[in-house]
Amino acid sequence: MLRRLAVLSVAGAALLVTPSVAVAGGGSSNQPLPPSSDFQKVTLNDFPGEPIALAVLPDRRVLHTARGGEVRIHEPATGRNVLAANIPVYLHDEEGVQGIAIDPDFKRNNWVYVYYSPVLNTPSDDPLTPQVNEGDAPTEGTAADFAPFKGHLQLSRFKLSGSTLRLNTEQKILQVPVDRGQCCHVGGKIDFDSKGNLYLSTGDDSNPFSSDGYAPIDERANRNPVFDAQRSAANTNDLRGKVLRIKVGSNGRYTIPKGNLFKPGTAKTKPEIYAMGLRNPFRFTIDPETDVIYLGDYSPDAQQPNPARGPAGHGRWLAIDKPANYGWPYCADSDKPYVDYDFATGTSGAAFNCAAPVNESPNNTGLRNLPPVEKAEIAYTYGASAQFPELGTGGIGPMGGPAYDYDKRSRSVFKWPAAFDGKPLFAEWTRDWVKALTLDRRNQVTKIESVLPELVFDNPMDLEFGPDGALYVLEYGDGYFAENPDAQLSRFDYVRGNRTPIAKVAATPTSGQSPLTVSFSSAGTADPDGDALRYEWYLDNDNRVDSRSPNPTFTYTKDGNYRPTLKVTDSTGRSSSAEVRLPVGTAAPVVTFVTPQEGQPFQFGDTVNFEVTVTDDAPVDCSRVTVTYVLGHDQHGHPLSTASGCTGSITTFLDAGHAGADNLTAVFVASYTDTGSPAQTGTATVVLEPSN
C-alpha cells in the first residue's frame, strides 16, 4: 500500500517537544465498499469468558483475554480454544486483565504483553460482616483512610511456549498507579508503531457518579481523590488518562523515545506521556503505514448540556498524529469547555479556557499551565449529529479500530479487498456497528461508511486484522460482567467464490461422574456450497484426533473440565469448529437469588438486601460467593460494588448525570466457584427496573 506523506510542523507550549510529524490521509473514497453478502462471519470461540482483548499471532492463532484472568488461544489447526494462562487479578469494579499484544519481533522472541490488575494486599469484603463491605474504599475520610486502597496496574510481558503463556517468565515493565475500591476507567490497550515503540492507553481512574454527568473535579479536602480527575488525566506528573509511549529493551526495562509530549527531565512531568487529557481511551490502533494513533475515548454521561456545568457527554474518535492534550476533565472538545464547579457550595464559576487550561487542583502534582486542547476528529453525543449523521443515535461507546493494510501479494482466501485499504475502522460498542473512515491529508474525516451492516457485531470489544487480511473481532454480547450467551471470538472473511463450512456440536449427557460415556452429534453441520466435509473430533484436551465419525461416542475415565471440539473441513481446505463444555467429575453449582427478585419494587438510593442460595454436590462455602452491583445503562454497565457471602446488603445509587436517562437498571450478579476437582462455577443475575 502506498500513501503520500505530508509533513506538518507542530506548534506547542515551550515545554513540549515539537518535531515534524509525518501525516497521511486514510484510504481512498473512490471505491465503494462491497456489500455484506460478499463476507462471511465465522465463529472461533463461543465460550470466551468475559471478553476483553485479542491479539492475532503470525501463524493465525488468536490470543484473547477474559477480565477474570483467563488468557485463551484459538488454534486454527485443530479448532480448539486452549487455556494458555490464568493470571491472578484484582477484580473490584472494572479491574482485571485488560490489554494484550505481541512483540513486533514475536517470531523470534515469543514475547506477549499483558496489562492487568495484580492482586496485591488491597482490602476485600469480609463475608462475616454482611452489613459492611470492606472492599469498597471510603468516599470521605483522610489520607490514612484511603491509603490501603492505593494500588497499580501492571504492564508486563511473558513468553509464549506452544500454547502456554509461561507466567514464571514475567518481566515487569511499567506500573500505573490507581485508587482501588471505587469505580471507574482503567483503559488498557497496547500497540506498537513501525519503530517498535510500545503505546499503552490508561483511563482517568476517576469515579463519575457524583458529578451529575459532567466533569469530576471535586476538590474537597475530606473527599476521596478518586472523585477528582484533575489528579490524573489533567496531571502532567501522572500516568493516568493518557497514551504512554516507551521503548522496551531486551531486559524488560524501557527508555523514552524522542518526541513525547514533555522533554525528559522537565520538572513535574512524566516523560512517558505522549497524549493526555483522556477519560477512558479503551481502544486504539496504530496505522501500520503512518504511525497515526486511531483512538476512541469514552464519554461522560450527561444527556443534556447545562449552562452551569458544561456540555452534554461526547464520545470522541481521535487521529493522534502528534503529542497533544485532549482536555479532559476541563473540555469535552477544544470548543466545548466545562464550567468550574465548587462541590462544597454547589456553585458554578467560569468556563474553563480550552486554549490555555490551568490545573489548580490541590490534588495536582504536575504543571499548573497545560498545553492547549487539541480538537477531536469526531465528537458525538447521544442524539443525532449534524456533522456526522452516519453515526445515528444511542449510547456512547467508541472503540478505535484498525486501519486495513491491503497486501496485493497475499494469497489468503480470507483477505479483505482493496476498497478498505488505509481506512481506519471505528466501532461503537453500544450501537453494535463498525464504520470505515476516509481521511484527508490532515487526518480529518471526509467520509463515513457502514461496514457489513447486515452482519452482526454484538458489542464489539476489540478488533484486529490478522496476517491473513481477515478481521478478527471479540464480541462482548448483551449483558453485564460475565460470559454473556452471545459473547464470542469471530472472524470476518471476504468470500472469493467458496464459503467456510458451519460446524455444530451437541453432547449427551453434558456432565457426570467418571467413567462417563458421552454421545456426540454433529447434527446441523453444513457447508453453504454443498461441499463434502471431513470430520475431526478432539475430545480429551489434546491435539490428537480422537474420531473422524460425524457422530462418535467417547468414554472419559478421568475427571476434568473438557471442551470437546469438532473441526470440519471442506474440499477447498476451509474449516470451522464448534465445541461444548463438558465437566466430568463434580457438577457445576446452581446459584439462585432468593432476594432480590425480578420485578420487586425498587428505587435508586435504596439499600438492597441480598440472599443467595447455592446447590452443589460438595459442601457450600458462603465465603466464596460474590455479589456485584452494576449500574445498567443501555446495553452497558458500571460495576460499582462487590460483596462476599450468601447474605448481605448493597446500597444502590444513581448520580444526577444518569437521572432521566432511558434504560437504567440495577443489576446484581452472583457467582460461586466450588472447591471440586475440577472446580466449577455457577452464576445468577437479577435485573431490577426502577419503579415509577
Image (spheres, grey):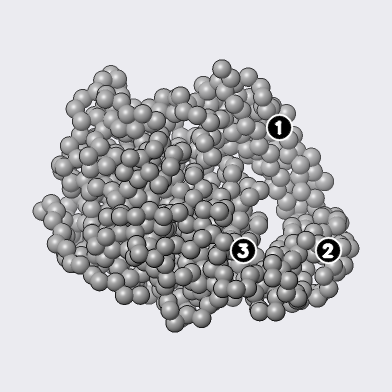
Q: Which residue is mark 3?
A: 42
Tell me which amino acid carries mark 1.
Phe
Residue 590 vs 519, above or below: the answer is: above
The residue shown at (54%, 59%) is: 36
Please identify the quadrant where the N terminus is shown: bottom left
Tag nearer the camera, 2 or 1: 2
* SS of the residue under disc 2: strand
Residue 397 picture location, percent across and down: 44, 45
Q: Which residue is mark 1?
A: 593
Direction from residue 413 to residue 375 in the image, left or right: left
Residue 188 vs 150, above or below: the answer is: below
The residue shown at (47%, 57%) is: 451
Q: Which residue is mark 2?
A: 520
Q: Earlier in the sequence, mark 3 or mark 2?
A: 3
Q: Which mark is residue 348?
A: none
Tell me which amino acid carries mark 2.
Phe
Q: Earlier in the sequence, mark 3 or mark 1?
A: 3
Residue 302 picture location, percent across and down: 38, 31
